[in-house]
Amino acid sequence: EPRREEALVERSLERAALWKEVNDRLDDNALGLSGGQQQRLCIARCLAVDPEVILMDEPASALDPIATSKIEDLIEDLAQDYTVIVVTHSMQQAARVSDQTAVFLTGGELVEYDDTEKIFENPESQRVEDYISGKFG
């Protein structure tokens, strides 16, 4: 059903904060979009299948501060309806967008998992403290 598909496209792009920017060029190649728009397009594609969990691997690693802010705002919005798991090396980003944080260090070892505020203000592990404070990593 074309109308149903069009509605799904619009709803997904709207939810990914992209509809207003691309609604007049839906048939254009996605490579013509900015990096931030491409990232939000990937998120819109994910939303189209209405998942329970959204996994984002370095969602803003190659983006400028404005595009990063849009992605982070989107993550906060999506977290109201979905479980969102973000993998990032940016401690600042983790502190801004997460409710809970898991810290994995060398070799993929889970060193600490707790509420984000506790991890960043009073971590249990000295290794986590050293990583967050920039002593290594």
Image (tube, helix red, strand yellow):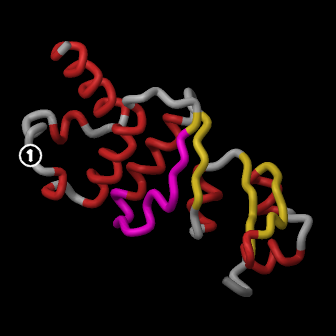
Span colored in magenta:
54-67
Looking at this view, name the residue that lies furthest to the front.
1
What amino acid type should be assigned to the residue bearing mark 1?
Answer: Asp
Residue 120 is left or right of residue 4, and the answer is right
Residue under label 1: 28
Residue drawn where x is 64% and y is 49% of the image: 98
- Give coordinates of residue 74: x percent, y percent: 44, 42
| Residue 62 part of the magenta-drawn span | yes
Looking at this view, name the residue that lies furthest to the right.
124
Please identify the quarter of the rendering in which residue 119 is found: bottom right
Residue drawn where x is 49% and y is 35% of the image: 77
Where 24 sits versus 5, above or below?
A: below
| Residue 110 part of the magenta-drawn span | no
- Give coordinates of residue 112: x percent, y percent: 84, 62
- Give coordinates of residue 5: x percent, y percent: 23, 20
Taking depth in this image into account, of 3 and 78 the one nearest to the observer is 3
Instruction: Bin the neighbour count of mark 1 within 10 Å (Cα to Cα): few under 14, some 14-19, many 20 and up.
Output: few
Where 18 sits versus 104, above or below?
A: above
Taking depth in this image into account, of 4 and 83 the one nearest to the observer is 4
